[in-house]
Amino acid sequence: MESLFYIYNNTIALNRLLFRQLDTHLTPSDMLRGILPKEYAFFDYFNQMINTNKEISDLFVLIMSISDNRTELSKQIRVLVRHSDYLSRSCTDLLHKTFLTPIDRNVIFTLVKRLDNLADHINAAAFRVSAYDVNDIRIEALEFSKIIQSCVEVLIIAINDLNKLKNKNQILECCKRVHELDNQADEIHRSAVSGLFKEGELLHLIKWKEIFERLEKAVDKCEDIACIIESILIEDS
């Protein structure tokens, strides 16, 4: 009986989309997404965005680790950031069209925006390293880049498990790990800024202070994402 009900509902949805295609020229991909269960579409966007952030964070670690080709690596990050923007807009468009959502629609919107913000902040740091013609990378910046990379790797696990809310304990452990990494980043940030002021080179201070502020914001966005994930678990319990 449930199978017949599911087929009936999908048949209605497909018919509606066929009529809509005549008016709006929907692509086959758009039609397929429309008849899939909506929760899979939203969680697919979450996974695509956090994996895009993984590519961005990996490239940023390379920028902090090597002296050659930083400008080219920064360009690659910008391409990925544009893809993140596209995913964010697409998910938001889907949210506007969806009547029932698997989790609170405000939570979906906020999570997508935080994932997009994360990409933007890493990009902002990479841009400044290139634009300010920074040659000598500070050890604290390399440490920061690896913390961001670790945060993203942990969030990939948590977001991948969000779909069916399986492995709640594992998700909570991932969120806990992000909070710990954020604390480490705070210590590095304080130490780095203190060292810059002690060195007394004004131009050097201005450049690196801006870069560290962007890196700090990137880690903060990771913690924001972890908090949103925790709120989803609380709502489900």
Image (cartoon, rainbow, N blue to C red):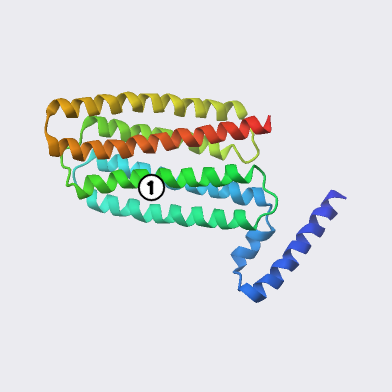
What residue is drawn where x is 22% and y is 25%? 194
Label tally: 1
Q: What residue appears at the point 45 percent right and 29 percent down from the top-left corner? A: 178
Q: Position of residue 78 (x, y in %)?
A: 34, 53
Vertical placement of residue 201 versus 125, above or below: above
- Viewer can see residue 132: yes
The residue at 31%/43% (across/down) is 60
If the image is split into quadrants, where does the C terminus sit?
Answer: top right
Horizontal and vertical percent for residue 14? 73, 65
Q: Point out the residue furthest to the right here.
A: 1
Q: Name the spot of residue 209 as percent of width and height, x first.
A: 24, 36
* Residue count near mark 1 (Cα–Cα under 10 Å), binned few <14, some 14–19, many ≥20: many
- Mark 1 residue type: Asp
The residue under label 1 is: 120
Question: In the drawing, does residue 175 fall left or right of residue 130?
Answer: right
Q: Secondary structure at mark 1?
A: helix
Residue 77, relative to residue 183: is it above or below? Answer: below
Q: Is residue 221 left or right of residue 10?
A: left
The image quarter containing residue 158 is: top right
**In this picture, is 60 found above or below 96?**
above
Percent x, y for residue 92?
55, 54
Identity of the residue drawn at 61% across and 64% down = 30
Query: Is residue 68 rendered to the left or right of residue 146?
Result: left
In this rendering, does residue 69 appear at all?
no
